[in-house]
Image (cartoon, helix red, strand yellow):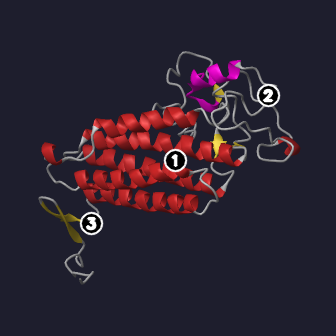
Amino acid sequence: MRIYTRSGDRGETWVIGGRVAKDDPRVEAYGTIDELNAAVGLAAAMMAEEPGDVFADLLEELCEIQNELFDCGSDLSYAEPVPDKMKVHDGMVRLLEERIDRLSGEAPPIRRFILPGGSRLSACLHLCRTICRRAERRTVALSRTGPCPEEVLRYLNRLSDYFFVAARAVNARLGVPDREYIRSADVFGRGPAEPKSPAGTAGSPASAKRVDPPGSPASANPAEPSEQAASAKQPEPVNSADPMAPATSAGASEPANPAQGPNPPGSGEAGESR
């Protein structure tokens, strides 16, 4: 089989139902999903290289997600969606939500914005998260110009949250602390930001806490009050004028999403619900 066809040499390609420019919003959307699929494949390959079966469940889920991302691209490739041929369905979204809830219990309660990293595998999953956000943005742009299956949008929105909690669960299983953004306020807990010295920054040996086994209800710091877990589930809203500080007025009614990084001050998107 010959790989090249020369039919796209003038900057056009086929979608189901017609021929469009290669920078058409539809091509941009499913092309970014393809890019995401490649990043997920890299994360899965890294997991497969880890000794033992500590990531067996996550590896199986990533392989399933790769097939579902192909389903997303397939659905978006229709110039006019055909309902009975769409592959992405509500059950996929519900399954992601169940996985998110399960993995959320493995990592210590989150209080501040965290930086991608800690371990190489966690950083790779954060890369998947950010590419997924871009795929979602491209799909939103498509929905404003033409037909777009709503289930694909819902799936991508939930998938980026899955990558966030999976990245934190990976660090927890490896006994590696998350790296906190050093100038973040106590956005998801309560109280002002605590001053940090160079020896006490997140990720340094001095700040490394005991990491409990996956699924343990205890936090990474056994001296912290158990109230932290409850406050992390009901985060304080973020001040739209300063996403790094807790809200002081009713102007910021949306809670911050830890799976989304802070937006630039004044952007009007701080604490945007994703």
In 3D space, how far apart are the residues under numbered discs 2 and 1 (Cα atoms)?
28 Å
Residue wearing tag 3 = 22
- Name which residue lies at 63% across and 33% down: 215
The quadrant of the rendering that contains the N terminus is bottom left
Q: Is residue 67 left or right of residue 266?
A: left
Q: Front-most of 192 and 64?
A: 64
Secondary structure under tag 3 reads loop
Residue hosting label 2: 222
Rendering coords of residue 12 (x, y %)? 21, 70
> Where residue 57 is drawn, which disc sits there?
1
Which disc is residue 8 wearing? none
Q: For the C terminus, which image quadrant? A: top left
Q: Residue at x 59, y 53 (%)?
A: 53
Task: For mark 1, give the secondary structure.
Answer: helix
Sort mark 2 into few (<14), some (14-19) or many (20+) by Cα contacts within 10 Å: few
Residue interval drawn in magenta: 227-244
Q: Rate crowding at label 1 as few (under 14), some (14 to 19) or many (20 or more) other CA atoms within 10 Å.
A: few
Q: In the rendered view, would you say 255 is above or below 200?
A: above
Are dots 1 and 3 in contact, CB under 8 Å? no
Q: Is residue 249 magenta?
A: no
Indicate the amino acid at tag 2.
Answer: Pro
Q: Is residue 236 visible?
A: yes
Amino acid carrying label 1: it is: Asp
Residue at image location 72% in from the left, 44% down from the top: 177
N-terminal label among 2 and 3? 3
- Give how far across and how far down residue 73 sits, in percent: 29, 55
Furthest residue to the bottom? 2
Among the 4 quarters of the image, the one containing residue 105? top right
Q: Is residue 11 above or below residue 254?
A: below
Above or below, 134 relative to 193: below
Q: Amino acid at mark 3?
A: Lys
Q: Of the two numbered discs 2 and 1 on the same chain, state the one appearing first in sequence.
A: 1
